[in-house]
Amino acid sequence: GNSVTQMEGPVTLSEEAFLTINCTYTATGYPSLFWYVQYPGEGLQLLLKATKADDKGSNKGFEATYRKETTSFHLEKGSVQVSDSAVYFCALRVYRGATNKLIFGTGTLLAVQP
Amino acid sequence: DGGITQSPKYLFRKEGQNVTLSCEQNLNHDAMYWYRQDPGQGLRLIYYSQIVNDFQKGDIAEGYSVSREKKESFPLTVTSAQKNPTAFYLCASSAASGSYEQYFGPGTRLTVT
């Protein structure tokens, strides 16, 4: 079946530190991959996406590269800020006709300290 | 501004009562979704609808019901049959074609006591 595995949190970093949140997936077919971010008490916002192997998604200083050979889509940022504190969700979508179902990982809480 | 609205943000009910959560979108999206979020479990799909007057069960539909009478609206009813209804509920929508990105509302936190 299709699934997403994320590293468990919380991840606690000091401001300006380098961030990596690991995400690996299992999927039949050729999935699209997404990172969503959830700030406290809010809904999810799409952070970045990649639709095919070797694509790099990027937004707001965050990056993730779709690695088919390692079935991974790790999220990285070179220098985190306190405002990046949130829960980050990795998700995949496998094309299956008209159905657009996302499968989410369990989320990783990031806490950035000043 | 285009977006998804969910109301209310916080909802309290007594056990045994049905409760309906509202979700409205003005993005002209064909597809809409309901997710449930529990601590440490990520998001789980309850119901989804690809077009008006049609919807399908997701992974955890038991104890829930939906309707899709209008393109803009996809209300979720949490019935008394739902064993553990206290959770954070998120509504989302997406276009029926193209990149299929899902856009999320701000969520409703339901507490049943």
Image (spheres, coloured by chain):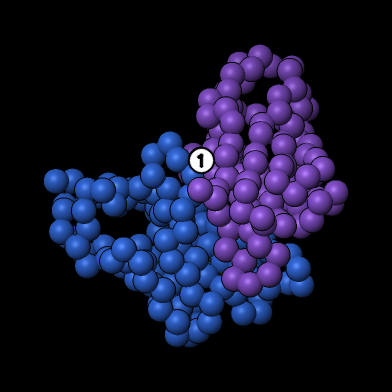
Quarter that holds the C terminus of chain B = top right
- Chain A colour is blue
Task: Say which residue label 1 marks.
Answer: B106
Q: Position of residue A44 (x, y in %)?
A: 48, 49
Locate residue A55 relative to residue B67 in the image: left or right: left
Q: Position of residue B4 (x, y in %)?
A: 57, 45
Quadrant of the rendered structure where residue B99 is? bottom right
Q: Position of residue A62 (x, y in %)?
A: 32, 66
Q: Nearer the viewer, residue A101 or B24?
A: B24
Q: Position of residue B43 (x, y in %)?
A: 57, 48
Q: Which residue corresponds to the image point at 76% horizontal and 57% vertical from the top-left? A: B50
| Whether residue A26 is visible | no
Crowd tier of the residue under label 1, counting other residues whose Cα lies within 10 Å: few below 14, some 14–19, many 20 or above? many
Q: Is residue A56 above or below residue A7?
A: below
- Badge 1 amino acid: Pro
Give me the chain that's purple: B
Q: Is residue A27 above or below residue B28?
A: below
Q: Which residue corresponds to the image point at 54% horizontal and 50% vertical from the top-left? A: B2
Q: Which residue corresponds to the image point at 59% horizontal and 31% vertical from the top-left? A: B7
